[in-house]
Amino acid sequence: MEKKLLPDNIIKQVKEVFSALEGPVKALFFRSEKKCDYCNTAEQLLNELSGINDKLAYEVFDVDSDMARKYEIELAPSIVLLTPDGDDKGVRFLGVPAGHEFGTLLQDIVTFSRGAKPELSKESLEKIEAIDTPVEIKVFVTTTCPYCPKAVLTAHHIAMANKNIKAYMIEANEFQEMSMKYGVSSVPQIVINDRVTFVGAYPEGQYVEQVLKAL
């Protein structure tokens, strides 16, 4: 029998967090049968979480499948969250959302259960909603980084505000080739449209300005 990832005390905490779930949330999990050191761990995590509350369900697809192409997923393991209406809000996890990023995943699941309404200021929302070209926000993290969840959640809420935006949490150690490509040496490192790069969990207003700079 597989060893549980989540100890009893964590399961108790997750139950409390998930008591706030409103509608059903579906996680699409993309794995690869080729070399994928973390696919089994990521899938087991979703399996254990979905066993805690039946409002969370997940489906498994191969990274070479039509579903992966539909959601523009090229790397595994990847997780895409869908709202109760089945809407994709551009929120992506590349790698296992463990350590500090486990809380990020839980918060996103609760937000998605409520329709994935972005928690941004009115001023930020107006600026983000006006964007009419594709934007890709990559947030490189490590599971031991305490500042990374804020940077990821801000990116995810920006994505929730505009269908043209996708925001990725990328576990830097799992995707070392990509980390090297973008010169990641400290986290959180944020890369927007491969044009603007900054390090640190910027306040929301500054974060939004960096997104606008990348257009």
Image (cartoon, grey):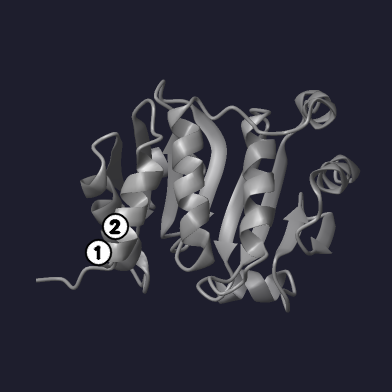
Residue 60 lies, with reference to residue 173, above or below; the image says above
* Residue found 75% across the figure and 75% down from its top: 183
Inspect this view and state whether residue 74 appears: no
Numbered label attached to residue 11 = 2
**Residue 10 is drawn in which quadrant?**
bottom left
Image quadrant where one finds the N terminus: bottom left
Image quadrant where one finds the C terminus: top right
Closer-to-camera residue (214/115):
115
Image coordinates for residue 137, horizontal then vertical, percent = 70, 49
Closer-to-camera residue (165/55):
55
Kind of element beneath mark 1: helix
Numbered label attached to residue 8 = 1
> Left of 59 or right of it: where is 74?
right
Image coordinates for residue 140, horizontal then vertical, percent = 65, 64
* Residue found 40% across the figure and 45% down from its top: 17
Alpha carbon distance from label 2 to label 1 = 5 Å
Amino acid found under the numbered disc labelled 2: Ile
Inspect this view and state whether residue 51 appears: yes
Crowd rating for badge 1 (residues with CA inside 10 Å; few <14, some 14–19, many 20+): few
> Left of 3 or right of it: where is 36?
right
Image coordinates for residue 37, horizontal then vertical, percent = 36, 74
**Residue 40 is drawn in which quadrant?**
bottom left
Residue 131 lies, with reference to residue 69, above or below; the image says above
Image coordinates for residue 20, horizontal then vertical, percent = 41, 35
Amino acid found under the numbered disc labelled 1: Asp
Q: Are circles 2 and 1 on residues that touch, CB within 8 Å?
A: yes
Kind of element beneath mark 2: helix
> Left of 66 or right of it: where is 145?
right
Numbered label attached to residue 70 = none
Crowd rating for badge 2 (residues with CA inside 10 Å; few <14, some 14–19, many 20+): some
